[in-house]
Image (cartoon, rainbow, N blue to C red):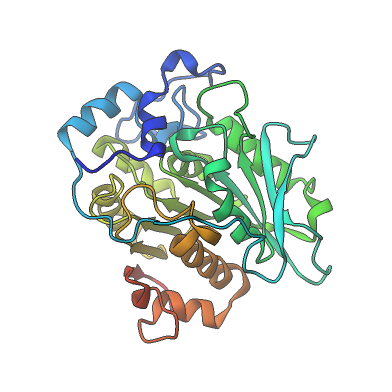
Amino acid sequence: MAPVSSYLKAFVAASAIGIAVRQTGTFVPKAGNFPKTGDDTIAGGIFCISLTDLGTYLSRNPTSGSTSEAPRGTAQATSGSGPYPATSFLDPALPKHTIFAPKTPPPNNVSMPFITFGNGGCGTDPAPFKNFLIELASYGYVIAAVGRAGGIGQSQSLVTNHRDGVDWGYTGKASKYGNVNTTAITTMGQSCGGLEAMSTAYHDERVKRIVMLNIAIFQDERRYLLQEIKVPVAYFIGGKSDMGYTNAEKDYKLLNAGLPAYKANLDTGHGGTYTATNGGKFGKAVVNYLQWQWRDDATAKAILLDPKSTGSLVSDKWTVEYKNWT
């Protein structure tokens, strides 16, 4: 089995006892059982796997392979490479989150899409993703990441925590950071945080895009829930040594017919490149996806879809597949 990343360790090590806040109701997957919301008593929500089942899954589905693109060397802390130098904020109106946004609000004619972010392991400290999230924010995005430095008094976050971020952004409480576009909301997350993001987006018409990082549904009996995903989904996966690889291949094929979807793999393993300067190649890939989706940026679109374009993901050694985009 490939070396276990810190994100996977958090996912495996968190105990059920450590989840201080319980959501009501226990979801039992069964064909035709579509609950009203994506909440569940387990971290990650209805698309996620219980800690008990996770151990069984990992013993039966070991991962192996190279991680030639995993970060090496010392990363630099920057304000991002985008036009709006960014940083992190603590906002009393959203006390269990960290906000990533431009240091100074961009001009009012710059419409700023809004993102919520779930951490690896459904953790409650977004520090491991700081370089990546600042990079995204520097292109004119406001991000509400679940948790604060040191955590928020529980070992794992829940869908309710993630939804708090959506509520905060949608109701205009992020306006101090710029002209936030509440019709352009993305839920995003890495590992367990990605399943949390999908569970948050489930049946929530405010969410228009889902970005899954190094993750997809573990259990075949839960895949029928993908029928209820009605917005474009993008998967950025760490290659065959990533535990998200096999399941992303399955989920991508099972998305509703005609639904736009994007899938890219880079040989990093489960940890991606989030800790690298400006989030490394995952930072570049996700920024360009967002710029294409929310700003109709033709150059960004070409980087994602055209292998021959300057700076394409393919030239960065990503393997790319997509469908239902024009």
Residue sitting nearer the eye, 44 or 60? 60
Q: Is residue 259 left or right of residue 67?
A: right
Most distant residue in the top direction: 17
| Residue 204 in view (yes/no) | no
Q: Is residue 273 left or right of residue 186?
A: left
Q: Is residue 154 left or right of residue 97?
A: left
Q: Quadrant of the C terminus?
A: bottom left
Residue 115 in the image: state x and y as whole percent: 62, 52
Most distant residue in the front direction: 73
- Please name the residue shown 55% across and 61% down the image: 278
Residue 52 in the image: state x and y as whole percent: 30, 21
- Please name the residue shown 59% across and 76% down the image: 296
Is 212 placed above or below 224 here?
below
Residue sitting nearer the eye, 229 or 42? 42
Q: Quadrant of the N terminus?
A: top left
Residue 155 in the image: state x and y as whole percent: 51, 23
- Please name the residue shown 42% across and 17% down the image: 16
| Residue 31 in view (yes/no) | yes
Q: Which of the 4 quarters of the picture holds residue 308?
A: bottom left
Is 288 placed above or below 131 here?
below
Is 323 placed above or below 164 here?
below
Most distant residue in the left direction: 60
Q: Is residue 268 left or right of residue 155?
A: left
Q: Which of the 4 quarters of the picture holds residue 132?
A: bottom right
Q: Which of the 4 quarters of the picture holds residue 107?
A: bottom right
- Numbered-mark total: 0
Residue sitting nearer the eye, 139 or 230? 139
Residue 124 in the image: state x and y as whole percent: 56, 32
